[in-house]
């Protein structure tokens, strides 16, 4: 069945011979000579070879033989042109590789559903509107009592669960390290449908009484990588923030929680909140939002119906909340806004992630950019393929003259294209993980579930775009080869073959346009990042480091925490390579901050329209950053209090003095002297303005570099200090200062953990993650696109110069200079580049409107960026034409005329 067509089939041959014998014997019986009878029988039967071919073509597996033959033919052809073959494969590898890499990351971050039971039924609840209280965490937060009550009283969910991410210090045996963890309700694993890989998981019985359930579940990856997959881990005692707990199980393989941007190593019952967070407890606090609450919809209930059925319960909850004891006094406007709040039901089949909002737009933009690169690569390869088809024009014409059908010629060309695309696809799949790793290296998040490895979905995507590229770049040369007229092609001289040049020039114009679009886009993103870098946060960042300590997590109680922070600050200030040091409660240059409404009382009383970011800092904090106090005074001993009694006081109210930035003054105290003005923390009518502004500092950018914010600073020493973020200005290199800092901390307490020790420049990079992603990768993609366009232009100009050899010889013979002859080629390159520019400018304007929200300090139609990108493209085009122009200018007139 799989035999080659030139081999005889015994049965077929025997049948043919039988027909010939019968016919010959009939003719002999009629009196014809045997020799003449045999010849006549053959004439009657017809061409035996043709009959054998028709028999072969009617067999079932003929197509496989044709395909195998086409593969062998394609391999012979690609071996004959190694330079163009390598160029085609590398072009396709770049196009397919970058598309595969970015799709892999987009698939993980935006498209892939959670590996749990029926993820499409999962939803996330979100409080939409004013909340009277405060939050701890970011996005979609609800209070714990709210979750408990809704779980008991709703009729739309089969079950619900809650979770809160938290870092803990985990000690197992002699090993101790900080890890990512999650506080979860007892219904967490059962609602998700997650199974144990070892032991058991948390249940409702592990989440009933505060502090009574000292059990934990470990993540499968942590169990394997850090504990070697030890099966004896179940039942073992571990220390979580120095509190003893028991491992009861390991979660199933492949489960990384519901937030891919932070993979937990350990899950702890919410009732162990105080132990897992070193003293913080909000299990019964209705005024603090800190939990992400998920539900699983009952069969037959969709998002819209679930939201509609939850609103009556939610409104009743709001009314009941205002009637409870302890409800704070609020303004009429705040009460109206509170009662107008709604409970939104959001799809959660992909889980939730704080980082998704940061990288979603960059990923979509980069997907579009890689799509343009793939198109450009296809145009480049189509150009080279047309050149290969032109070089084989006479051979193709000869095959057509000998009977090859148009379909056979097209098929052979497409198979050759498929062979090249397959090689490019394989190389692109090898290249893709490296591109993904570059992307991941730009992300600040540690412990992310994003991976550079390719899975089946991504490989199928790579296969699909490989097939697409086969059609895109193989279709044009295949149709061109099939359109060859044998009579005309066989009569043409090699130097007279000019067919396809117009198509190739059109493809080069398209390449130049695409390259210029990517150059302009990359230029806009690079200028945006440059603007942020030049602007900076508002203070010098060189030789400035930061680190955190969390004394409560490391076993200190509240009474001993503040003296420890004081001692640490004194020890660090005394280091020889430290110029200055200061402490704050919260990190700067992050999106998270403590925020509250503020009542301002000066010539009149007003409440801030938005919550104001706040921090508590030491006196040396502003000096360390290099932010001057422009009016009033800095904090000093007048703003400290004695904590020797160990009693704690809430720093959000009743403090004697604050410092504000000049942005706060501009917004809320524009026409009065701010020094001596009074503030109150809160926006209710009973808020007492018992805090005095004693100083004003220059505004520095804190949570965002795009928009300055008003900010209020309290004295660190007027409150109990439960954690501290240290800022250190060093005289030496950052590496040497970091070693000195670690040594100073070890001298005070070897068990105290130094957290997040990094430079402020690193912290700034984390804040600018979106801008860095776009500038770095868009810039790299623009370089790739420009190189591809350069290759395409070089190929067309070289082909054009070769076809104009006779013309150049005549021009030189008639007295034209070599510079003039070469100038013809350069002028041709410039014309193609300008044509591409004419297409790219309006296209860039349209595309620029789509990315305008990602820009800063530069407009989408920025003239400087466009001129610079156009200049780069023109220089590249001139460089591509240099070789062809040099050859055109060095043609020997005698040899050029003799060549014809």
Image (spheres, rainbow, N blue to C red):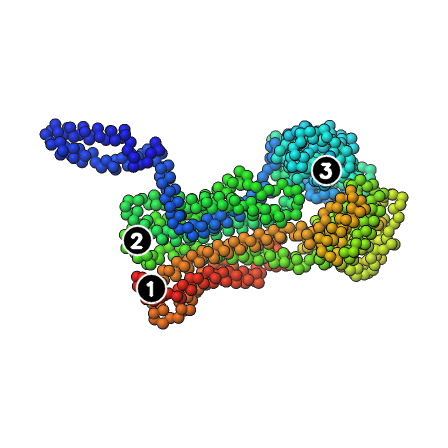
Please state the horizontal and vertical placement of residue 844, each as a whole percent of the image.
53, 56
Q: Is residue 624 visible?
A: no
The residue carrying mark 2 is 489
Q: Which mark is residue 764?
A: none
How far apart are the two marked residues, 1 and 2, measured between alpha carbons? 22 Å
User: Which type of secondary structure does the marked residue at label 1 adopt?
Assistant: helix
User: Which type of secondary structure does the marked residue at label 2 adopt?
Assistant: helix
Quadrant, the N terminus: top left
How far apart are the two marked residues, 3 and 1, measured between alpha carbons? 80 Å
Q: Is residue 21 visible?
A: yes
The residue carrying mark 1 is 896
Locate residue 726 relative to residue 646 in the image: left or right. left
Q: Report the front residue among 783 and 329.
A: 783
Q: Looking at the image, which residue is at 81% across and 46% down?
A: 748
Mark 3 vs 1, N-terminal side? 3
The residue carrying mark 3 is 175
Locate residue 770 relative to residue 744 in the image: left or right. left
Q: Report the front residue among 601 and 200.
A: 200
Mark 1 vs 2, N-terminal side? 2
For residue 767, above or below residue 807: above
């Amino acid at each position: 069945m799989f035999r080659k067509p030139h081999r005889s089939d015994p049965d077929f041959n025997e049948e043919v011979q039988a027909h010939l014998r019968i016919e010959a014997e009939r003719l002999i019986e009629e009196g014809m000579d045997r020799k003449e009878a045999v010849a006549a029988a053959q004439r009657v039967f017809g061409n035996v070879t043709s009959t054998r071919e028709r028999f072969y073509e009617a067999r079932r597996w003929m197509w496989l033989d044709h395909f195998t033959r086409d593969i062998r033919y394609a391999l012979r052809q690609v071996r004959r042109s190694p330079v163009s073959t390598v160029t085609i494969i590398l072009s396709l590898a770049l196009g397919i590789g970058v598309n595969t890499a970015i799709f892999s990351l987009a698939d993980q971050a935006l498209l892939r559903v959670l590996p749990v039971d029926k993820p499409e039924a999962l939803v996330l609840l979100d409080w939409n509107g004013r909340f009277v209280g405060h939050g701890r965490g970011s996005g979609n937060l609800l209070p714990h009592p709210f979750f408990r009550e809704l779980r008991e009283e709703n009729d739309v969910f089969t079950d619900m669960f809650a979770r809160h991410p938290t870092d803990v210090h985990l000690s197992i045996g002699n090993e101790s390290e900080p890890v990512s963890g999650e506080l979860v309700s007892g219904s967490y694993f059962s609602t998700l449908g997650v199974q144990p890989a070892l032991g058991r998981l948390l249940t409702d019985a592990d989440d009933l009484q505060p502090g009574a359930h000292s059990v934990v579940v470990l993540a499968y990856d942590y169990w394997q990588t850090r504990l070697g997959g030890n099966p004896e881990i179940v039942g073992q005692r571990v220390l979580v923030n120095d509190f003893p707990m028991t491992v009861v199980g390991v979660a199933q393989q492949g489960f990384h929680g519901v937030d891919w941007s932070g993979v937990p190593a350990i899950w702890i019952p919410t009732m162990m909140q105080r132990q897992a967070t070193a003293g913080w407890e909000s299990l019964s606090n209705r005024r603090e939002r800190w939990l992400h609450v998920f539900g699983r919809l009952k069969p037959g209930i969709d998002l819209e119906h679930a939201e509609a059925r939850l609103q009556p319960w939610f409104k009743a909850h709001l009314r009941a909340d205002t009637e409870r004891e302890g409800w704070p006094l609020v303004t009429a406007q705040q009460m109206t806004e509170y009662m107008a709040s709604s409970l939104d039901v959001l799809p959660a089949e992909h889980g939730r992630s704080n980082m998704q909002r940061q990288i979603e737009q960059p990923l979509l933009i980069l997907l579009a950019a890689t799509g343009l690169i793939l198109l450009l690569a296809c145009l480049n390869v189509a150009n080279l393929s047309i050149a290969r088809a032109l070089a084989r024009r006479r051979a193709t014409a000869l095959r057509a003259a000998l009977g090859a059908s148009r379909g056979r010629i097209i098929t052979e060309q497409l198979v050759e294209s498929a062979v090249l695309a397959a090689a490019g696809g394989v190389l692109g799949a090898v290249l893709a993980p490296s591109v993904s790793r570059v992307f991941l290296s730009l992300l600040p998040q540690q412990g992310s579930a994003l991976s550079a490895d390719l899975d089946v979905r991504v490989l199928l995507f790579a296969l699909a775009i490989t097939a697409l590229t086969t059609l895109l770049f193989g279709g044009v040369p295949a149709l061109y080869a099939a359109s060859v007229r044998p009579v005309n092609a066989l009569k043409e001289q090699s130097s007279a073959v000019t067919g396809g040049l117009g198509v190739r020039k059109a493809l080069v114009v398209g390449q130049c346009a695409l390259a210029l679009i990517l150059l302009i886009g990359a230029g806009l993103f690079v200028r945006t990042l440059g603007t942020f870098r030049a602007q900076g946060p508002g203070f010098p960042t060189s030789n400035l480091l930061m680190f955190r300590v969390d004394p409560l997590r490391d076993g200190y109680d509240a009474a001993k925490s503040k003296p420890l922070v004081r001692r640490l600050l004194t020890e660090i200030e005394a280091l020889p390579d430290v110029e200055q040091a200061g402490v704050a409660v919260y990190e700067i240059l992050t999106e998270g901050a403590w925020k509250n409404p503020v009542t301002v009382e000066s010539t009149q009383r007003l409440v801030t329209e938005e919550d104001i970011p706040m921090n508590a800092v030491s006196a040396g904090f502003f000096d360390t950053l290099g932010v001057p106090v422009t009016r009033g005074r800095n904090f000093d001993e007048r703003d400290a209090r004695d904590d020797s009694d160990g009693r704690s006081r809430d720093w959000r109210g009743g403090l004697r003095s604050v410092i504000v930035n000049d942005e706060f003054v501009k917004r809320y105290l524009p026409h009065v002297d701010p020094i001596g003005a009074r503030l109150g923390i809160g926006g209710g009518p009973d808020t007492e303005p018992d805090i005095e502004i004693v100083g004003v500092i220059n505004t520095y950018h804190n949570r965002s570099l795009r928009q300055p914010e008003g900010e209020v600073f309290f004295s660190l020493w007027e409150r109990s200090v439960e954690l501290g973020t240290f800022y250190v200005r060093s005289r030496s290199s950052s590496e040497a200062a970091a070693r000195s800092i670690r040594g100073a901390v070890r001298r005070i307490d070897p068990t105290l953990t130094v957290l997040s020790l990094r430079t402020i420049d690193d912290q700034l990079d984390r804040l600018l993650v979106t801008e860095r992603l776009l500038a770095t990768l868009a810039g790299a993609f623009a370089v790739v696109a420009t190189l591809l366009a350069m290759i395409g232009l070089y190929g067309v100009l070289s082909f054009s110069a070769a076809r104009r050899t006779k013309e150049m010889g005549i021009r030189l013979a008639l007295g034209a200079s070599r510079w003039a002859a070469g100038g013809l080629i350069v002028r041709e390159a410039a014309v193609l580049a300008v044509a591409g520019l004419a297409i790219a400018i309006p296209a860039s304007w349209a595309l620029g409107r789509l990315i305008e929200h990602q820009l800063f300090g530069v407009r989408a139609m920025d003239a400087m960026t466009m001129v610079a990108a156009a200049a780069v493209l023109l220089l590249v085009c001139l460089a591509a034409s240099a070789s062809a122009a040099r050859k055109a200018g060095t043609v020997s007139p005698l040899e050029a005329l003799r060549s014809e």
